[in-house]
Every structure is written in C-alpha cells, then in structure tokens.
Image (cartoon, grey):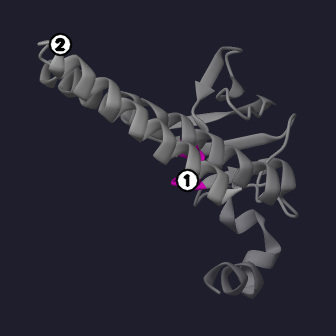
Amino acid sequence: MGLDFTMKAVYTGIWIAAVSLFMELLGVNTKKWITAGGFGTVLLTLAGREILTNFISSIMINASRPFVVNEWIATKIDGVEVIGVIEHVGMWSPTVIRGDDKEAIYIPNHKFTVSIVRNNSRRTHWRIKTYLAISHMDAGKISVWHSGAIYNDLKT
C-alpha cells in the first residue's frame, strides 16, 4: 500500500514537471501558478489539520468512552463551564450537549481531549452539603449537646 502511494506521487510529480517545462517552452510563466499551488496546499493543510484532529479525537472518545449518549457531564472548555446531557457524539461532526436550559451546545471533539470532563452519571456516591444553624439560645434544649458528643463529633 505504501509503495503504491509512493509510485503514484512520483508519477504525478513527473507529470507536473513535464507540463510545467512544456508551458515554459511555449513562453508561459509558470512561477505564478506554482506559487499559487503551493499557497493553496498550505491552506488545505491548515484546514485539514483541524478536521483530522477532530476525527482522531472522536476515535479516542469512542474507544475510551469517557461519556456516552444520555449521560450528564460537566466540563470547562475555553473558560466556559458547560453542564448538560450528551445528545450526540459525532465522528466528523461535533459533540452535542443539551444544556440545563435546553439549549444545544456544539463542542468540537478535540476540546474534550484537552479538558477535564466530569461524568456525573457514573458517580458511585453523592455528597449532600447542608448547613445546620442552631441558635445559642436553643443549645440548652439539646441534652446531647451538654454531654459533648455532638461537639466532639463536629470537631473531628
């Protein structure tokens, strides 16, 4: 396969050189065309790099499965906190997340490979933080408080 590609590239290069020399013999300036072709190649390479990066990242996401469709994730991408449910994990297209306010958020796949993703659907334990406010006037009504059990438990 590699040899076949190499042979085709050499064959194409020989034809381009032959056509360029023939046009030079006819008096046509081919430097402008070669320069434009090189500039176009650079533009296509830069555009293709982004597409290739997204494709490879989508392969990584589908292989490692940090999240799948209908899972609730939270991540920070480019300084913006994104929280929602995965609707679609694309191969060539971006991943779609449905936010808390039901808006569709489209994120390129390569952004997930360089950011921390919290998959809230796969949590094994949930922590609930709450604050219990007890007035100093009500503390005397709690008999356990005087024994020091609550105070010692809160202290540790």
Pointer 1 residue: 6
Image coords of residue 62 (percent x, y): 80, 49
Marks 1/2: CA–CA distance:
30 Å
Q: Earlier in the sequence, mark 1 or mark 2?
A: 1
Q: Amino acid at mark 1?
A: Thr
Verify whether residue 61 appears in magenta.
Answer: no
Residue closest to the eye, 29 or 47: 29
Tell me where residue 144 sits by quadrant. bottom right
Q: Identify the residue at image location x=69%, y=44%.
A: 58
Mark 2, secondary structure of its residue = loop
Mark 1, secondary structure of its residue = helix
Image coords of residue 64 (percent x, y): 78, 59
Q: Identify the residue at image location x=63%, y=48%.
A: 57
Asked if residue 14 lies left or right of residue 9, the reply is left
Question: Which quarter of the rendered picture does the N terminus lie within?
Answer: bottom right
Question: Is 7 rendered above or below residue 31?
Answer: below
Tell me where residue 96 sits by quadrant. top right
Q: Which residues are magenta?
A: 110-116
Image coords of residue 55 (percent x, y): 64, 41
Q: Amino acid at mark 2?
A: Leu
Query: Is residue 80 visible in the rendered structure shown here?
Result: no
Query: Is residue 97 visible in the rendered structure shown here?
Result: yes
| Disc 1: CA contacts within 10 A as few (<14), some (14-19) or many (>=20) | few
Residue closest to the eye, 23 or 59: 23
Residue closest to the eye, 94 or 73: 94
